[in-house]
Image (cartoon, rainbow, N blue to C red):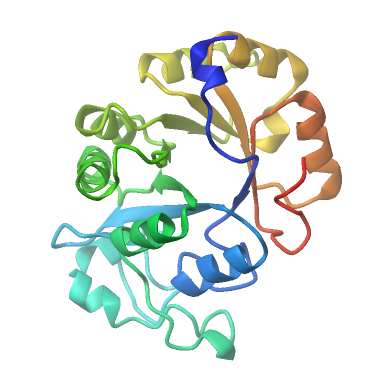
Amino acid sequence: MTENLKSWPYPLWVAHRGAGKLAPENTMAAFRLGAAHGYRMFECDAKLSADGVLFLMHDATLERTTNGHGTGGDLSMGEIAQLDAGSWHSRAYGGEALPTLEALARWCLANHFFLNVEIKPTPGQEEATGRATGELMNRIWPQDRVPPLFTSFKTDALKGARDTAPHIPRGLLVDRLADATGDADLRTALELGCAAMVLNHALWDAALVAKVHGAGLRCSSYTVNDEWAAQRLIDLGTDGVITDRVDMFSPASR
C-alpha cells in the first residue's frame, strides 16, 4: 500500500450538496441539516461570480434552484446573494441564500468538518475557477488542518487547482469510462496528480478498484442512494460514498 493510501484522512460517508434532497442543495440550511444527521464531510459545487467570488450552485443556469434567470456566473455576488434559493424546495426554506464557498469553508473549519469542493465551472471558466478555488483555500485554510478535497469532471479546473494549491488533494470525477478497462481515466488522474477517482457508483468493480488502489489512488462514488448499492461499494473496499440519503445511512458505520 502506498503512503498516499495510508494517509487518506477523510470519512467514508459524504453528504451530497449538504443534505441531499432533504433541504435546498448548496445552501447553509442543507449543510446544517446534514450535520444534524451526523455527517462530518460535505460535498458542494463551486463556481465563479462575474466579480470573481466563488459561490455555491450546481447548474450553470439559475432557474432550477433559485428565483433568478440566466447564467449564475453572469451576476455579481451582490446580485447572487439576493436570490431566493429555497422556495423551489419547500416553504420552510423560502428566502434561503446561495452562500459563498468561503462562508461554507469557514463553517466547516469552525465545526471541524471535512469538505469536498466540486469545482463546477461555468463553461469557459474551467481553469480560472480551479485557480480561484486553490487561491481561496491557500488564504483561509490552516496548513495544520486536514485540507479540503478538490474534485471536478473538468481537467482544466483540476489543473488550475493544482497550479495554485498543489498540496490540496484532487479527485477526478468520471460519469462514463473512456474505455472498457478504465485505464484511460486512470492515466488522466495520474497525469493530473490526483489522489482519488470519484466515479458514478455503477462503474466500480473489483478489478477497477484493485487497479486504482494499486496505482496509489483512492476510490470514491456518487450518488449512492440505495442500501444494496452502498453495501456493494463497501464490500468492494471503496473509500468514499457520496449520498443524498443522509436520513438513511449512518455516517458512523461502514
Q: Identify which residue is drawn at 25% across, 40% down.
A: 134
The answer to whether residue 188 is left or right of residue 248 is left
Residue 239 location (% of width, % of height): 64, 31
Residue 240 location (% of width, % of height): 63, 37
The quarter of the rendered structure image containing the C terminus is: top right
The answer to whether residue 185 is left or right of residue 241 is left
Q: Nearer the viewer, residue 216 or 130?
A: 216
Q: Nearer the viewer, residue 186 or 114?
A: 114
Count of numbered circles in the view: 0
Residue 48 location (% of width, % of height): 25, 56
The quarter of the rendered structure image containing the N terminus is: top right
The quadrant in which residue 192 appears is: top left
| Residue 177 visible to an observer of this rendering | no
Q: Identify which residue is drawn at 40% across, 30% down.
A: 169
The quadrant in which residue 221 appears is: top right
Identity of the residue furthest to the front in this view? 144
Q: Nearer the viewer, residue 50 or 148?
A: 148
Q: Identify which residue is drawn at 60% across, 64% down.
A: 34
Identity of the residue furthest to the left in this view? 51
